[in-house]
Image: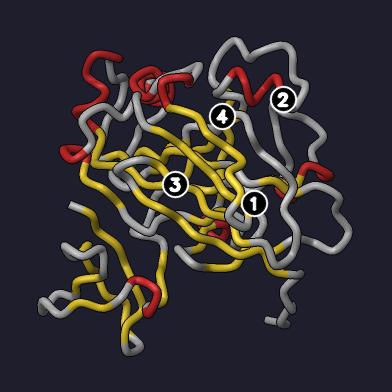
């Protein structure tokens, strides 16, 4: 089943996908998916992000020495934004690219998970677009906060899909379009570190908890995005995520 969260009549409502692709409210009524305000599909816990987890992407950004172990960094909840939301391009940058990624959501508390047992601890999956501001990147191993932790720089959704609905998460097509032009076309089978190995690695030194999100990296095909662009990232069987690039948002004193 596909699950999501929306704002409806001023309230946060948990919904599911209707048979026609619309949004089914708890009472059974259906709303068109482009007529609601989407939130990230759940309240995530710790957000893990993977860098250079596809060899072809590492090559396209001219990184020639692959990491000896998974290159993992953390993201804050402020970075997330829902389906049909807006992400912002700073006015002073020359290169901001999209990244279509499979998000893996942990379903139960675990530590020291064996690789062969890893899928037992997966609740489900979601589509993620992890924008990067390349101008600010100084170190691939430790990307600074301005590269990957900007407000609303990581669209996620629209749906969280139950693990039981995805027969083989290591054979899913990932595609991205900018203004209708196909830019990215890859497959999760090309990950350097697959899902079981990532769960085994992370749980070897820290406890994973329900709702933790592991973003598994992106294949090649990334490209620069400009203000006004519509970016669509899609993972087969998981979801089609739409996002628009906006100019720098106004800041409000707190």
Q: Earlier in the sequence, mark 2 or mark 1?
A: 2
Residue 165 location, quadrant: top left
Q: Earlier in the sequence, mark 3 or mark 2?
A: 2
**Cα–Cα gap, marks 2 and 4:** 9 Å
Q: Residue at x 29, y 62 (%)?
A: 4
Check the image and report above or below for 36 versus 197.
below
Q: Secondary structure at mark 4?
A: loop
Check the image and report above or below for 58 versus 94.
above
Location of residue 197 in the rendering, given as x and y in whole percent from the top left corner: 39, 17
Q: Is there a contact, CB below 8 Å, between mark 1 and mark 4?
A: no
The front one of 29 and 146 is 29
Q: Which mark is residue 166?
A: none
The residue singled out by tag 1 in the image is 149
Q: Secondary structure at mark 3?
A: strand
Q: Residues within 10 Å of mark 1 (few under 14, many from 20)?
A: many
Q: Earlier in the sequence, mark 1 or mark 4?
A: 1
**Cα–Cα gap, marks 1 and 4:** 20 Å
Residue 18 location, quadrant: bottom left
**Cα–Cα gap, marks 2 and 1:** 23 Å
**Cα–Cα gap, marks 3 and 2:** 21 Å
Q: Is residue 172 left or right of residue 136?
A: left
Disc 2 versus disc 1: nearer the observer: 2
Q: Residue at x 23, y 32 (%)?
A: 121
Q: Which mark is residue 219?
A: 4
Q: Residue at x 61, y 41 (%)?
A: 183
Residue 72 location, quadrant: top right
**Cα–Cα gap, marks 4 and 3:** 13 Å
Q: Residues within 10 Å of mark 2 (few under 14, many from 20)?
A: few
The residue singled out by tag 3 in the image is 234
The residue singled out by tag 2 in the image is 60
Check the image and report above or below for 119 versus 180.
above
């Amino acid at each position: 089943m596909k699950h999501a969260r929306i704002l409806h009549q001023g309230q946060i409502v948990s919904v599911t996908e209707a048979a026609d692709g619309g949004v089914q409210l708890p009472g059974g009524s259906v709303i068109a998916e482009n007529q609601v305000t989407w939130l990230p599909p759940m309240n995530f816990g710790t957000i893990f992000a993977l860098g250079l987890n596809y060899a072809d992407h590492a090559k396209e950004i001219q990184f020639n020495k692959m990491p000896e172990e998974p290159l993992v960094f953390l993201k804050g909840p402020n970075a997330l934004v829902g389906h049909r939301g807006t992400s912002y391009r700073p006015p002073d940058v020359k290169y901001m690219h999209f990244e279509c990624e499979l998000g893996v959501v942990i379903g139960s508390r675990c530590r020291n998970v064996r690789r062969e047992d890893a899928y037992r601890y997966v609740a489900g999956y979601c589509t993620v677009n992890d924008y990067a501001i390349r101008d600010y990147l100084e170190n691939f191993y430790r990307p600074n906060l301005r590269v990957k932790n900007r407000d609303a720089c990581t669209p996620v959704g629209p749906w969280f899909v139950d693990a039981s609905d995805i027969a083989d998460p290591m054979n899913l097509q990932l595609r991205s379009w900018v203004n209708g032009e196909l830019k990215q076309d890859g497959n999760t089978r090309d990950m350097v570190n697959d899902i079981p190995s990532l769960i085994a690695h992370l749980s070897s030194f820290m406890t994973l908890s329900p709702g933790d999100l592991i973003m598994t990296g992106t294949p090649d095909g990334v490209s620069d995005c400009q203000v006004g662009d519509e970016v669509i990232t899609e993972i087969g069987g998981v979801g089609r995520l739409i996002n628009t690039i906006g100019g720098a948002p106004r800041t409000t004193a707190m």
